[in-house]
Amino acid sequence: MKLGIIGAGNMASAIIGGIIKKEILGKNDIICSSPVESERNKAKESFGIAVTADNKEVVEKAEIILFAVKPQVIPAVAAELKDQVDENKLIISIVAGKTIAWFNEAFGKKLKIVRTMPNTPALVGEGMTGVSPSDEVTEEELAEVMKILSSFGEAEVVPEKIMEAVVSVSGSSPAYVFMMIEAMADGAVRLGMPRNKAYKFAAQAVYGSAKMVLETGKHPGELKDMVCSPAGTTIEAVRVLEDKGFRSSLIEAMEACADISRKL
């Protein structure tokens, strides 16, 4: 089975790196296209895969096609490849906002397509990917896709109707977390901690806290309560966060994120 990737940006690189590291496919089983020469050279030098500037060559040589381009670019790519992509190709899309129905209409046929939404922690092997297959995708084909997507983090099948929630809770959320880490570090610097140490303390606290949620199985509220001693420092910090609308701000941000995703 040969994998063809249209696009060679950061997410494509994360996916290729994970696939090769986990030995899901060999470097000779992957071909990647990009109109940008520097991206092609980087992919070839980093992973030893075949690269090309011709999207049609990718489609001709691969059974699985992964679209890893920007939402603004995919209409032109679909128009270019409409006649090359047939119902026998297994399609994976990481294009934000583009539904299964959109792909079927753009290509003029019902495709075997798996709509996905990964996130940038895939770059360090800790991605989270939402997965929605079309009815044309068989269980065996979905299993093959899940193997690919799990090579750079976690992947879970979800109904397509909640894909905007996936975009807001994991696809875009690393930006929210990075902002929180930066703000926590700024607070630590204000209190006298050197900047380099502040980033490490803040990032490790977020990493460790997330790991506790995933590994203990406890509700986040219960874990929060475990840190909040009566009349202590943490409950006072929590009070201020509640007063400043910490939770509501996140929820509103996620609503806005989902709204933009629907309009892409």
Image: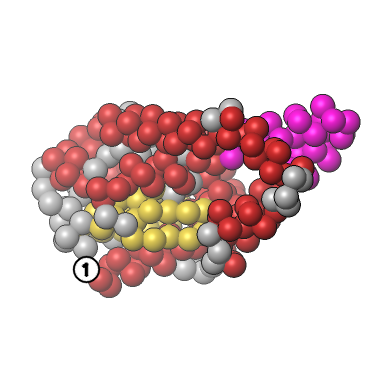
Q: Quadrant of residue 137?
A: bottom left
SS class, disc 1: loop
Residue at left offset 58%, top offset 35%: 242
Residue 1: where, in percent of width, then height? 34, 67
Task: Give the left or right position of residue 204, taking residue 54 as reference.
Answer: right
| Farthest residue, direction front | 231
Per the image, the residue denoted by label 1 is 138
The vertical placement of 146 against 164, above or below, is below
Task: Give the left or right position of residue 256, taking residue 76 as reference.
Answer: right
Q: Which one is nearer the viewer's eye here, 263 or 70? A: 263
Quadrant of image for the C terminus: top left
Residue 247: where, in percent of width, then height? 52, 37
Q: Quadrant of residue 215?
A: bottom right
Residue at left offset 34%, top offset 29%: 260
Residue at left offset 44%, top offset 49%: 118
* Badge 1 density bin: few <14, some 14–19, many ≥20, Cα 10 Å: few
Residue 71: where, in percent of width, then height? 33, 33
Q: Which residues are magenta?
A: 177-203
- Residue 51 can be seen in this image: no
Is residue 107 in the magenta section? Answer: no
Q: How many marks?
A: 1
Is residue 192 in the magenta section? Answer: yes
Residue at left offset 59%, top offset 30%: 243
